[in-house]
Amino acid sequence: MSTSPSRVFAARLAGLPVFDPAGDQVGKVRDLVVVLRPGGLPPRVLGLVVEVFGRRSIFVPMTRVTSIDKGQVITTGLVNMRRFEQRPTETLVFGQMLDRRVRVRDSGVEGAVYDLAMEQARNRDWVISRVALQEGPVKRFGRKGQTHVADWRDVEGFDALEQAQGATHLLAALEEMRPADLANVIHDLPAKRRLEIAAALDDERLADVLEELPEEDQVEILGNLDSERAADVLEEMSPDDAADLIAELPPETAEALLQLMEPEEAEDVRRLMSYEEHTAGGMMTTEPVILPPDATIADALAHVRQAELSPSLAALVYVVRPPLEPPTGRLLGVAHIQRLLREPPSTLVGGALDTDIEPLKPTSSLEDVARHLATYNLVAAPVVDQDGRLVGAVTVDDLLDHLLPENWRDTPSRTDGSIRA
């Protein structure tokens, strides 16, 4: 690893692209794996946790890393593609060491760890050699305490693995992650650390992350929030995801949370919970883009530009008679985003409708939904009740979530490489 700097600060590795020798990107760095050693010996860095395409984390031993430089990591290309599973003797740098309260023995300085430096020893092993800490209470905003960098041997506090730990510096290192990527990182952490990170996220960010987590993680995190905050987080989730999560809770807990939610939000969730799980009604969202026929193309385009809309929800505008909240007035048709982009902005959206596609019913099965989307080359479709009123929309991502096995996030790739050392 002669092209690598002699000392590398771990936080700078977060999110760095990982390449094979041919220059093809393998994934991104999500964490470092170390082994804590007795007698004050610096921890040995075993390797990197790398998120590969498909949102799965794998382990890349340091022996497979040939370069860490210029904003990238280069490997030999021979890596094990099995999903990373942390062993009891291993510690995650970002997941378990950042934000830990430690003390410098000689000076008595105490603070929270915000970074760690690793360097290569004479035997070519990488070890954690320096600890960067920030004095005073940890704050994401406002004035920060004085910072210090100390030798690993002079710092104490990392042996207290069960102590309470914040998440400020970890979240700072992972701040730019998409919710799905952050969910993948959280899923791989020990349960205690997952809950600490959930406590540090704001309601909207936590809701986005929960939507991407497996059900068991969702239930675990929500169950450890106080009831008021749990209800607030559920309100920030899309109604279909909130309904799926609430359905996994004990009935008395579910009812208590629904009572704490805003009445309109709770009503949407209750309506979705009334449908069978594997039907269009059970997987649809009640928050598509809905407009009256006298809205203009400009109005429609302004609505689909909203950043919080998924691409599949932004692909269609649903045009209905008032009222505009589901269940709406009668569905008149849908307007495709491609058609909207071809029309003058002042044109009424009612003049750009596709009225030939038969809507789905809430009772339509998964197979019916899949066949419908495939037949008409759609990424979303309206769902109407027996009176032709729009009650929601099914998107292709909702369909895939229900068609894939429950543990699809943890299913290893068929591609396999070298065996983890």
Image: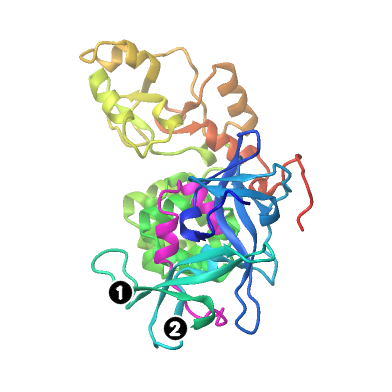
Magenta region: 157-186
Quadrant of residue 32 in the image?
A: bottom right
Tell me if residue 181 is in the magenta stretch. Answer: yes
Q: Identify the element where label 1 is drawn.
A: loop
User: Which quadrant of the figure contains the C terminus?
Assistant: bottom right
Q: Residue at x 50, y 65 (%)?
A: 117
Report whether 158 appears left or right of 239.
right
State the image coordinates of residue 337 (x, y, percent, origin top left): 38, 20
- Counting residues from the start of the chain, the first of labels 2 and 1 encountered is 2
Amino acid type assigned to the residue bearing label 2 in the image: Arg
Report whether 293 appears left or right of 274.
left
Q: Are marks 2 and 1 in contact (CB under 8 Å)?
A: no
State the image coordinates of residue 315 (x, y, percent, origin top left): 42, 25
Depth check: 160 or 41 in front? 41
- In the displayed structure, would residue 54 be above or below residue 289? below
State the image coordinates of residue 122 (x, y, percent, origin top left): 66, 66
Depth check: 1 or 111 in front? 1
Q: In the orientation shown, which residue stands out farthest toward the left? A: 346
Q: Residue at x 48, y 63 (%)?
A: 222
Q: Looking at the rendered structure, which numbered label has been put on residue 146? A: 1
Amino acid type assigned to the residue bearing label 1 in the image: Gln
Residue wearing tag 2: 103
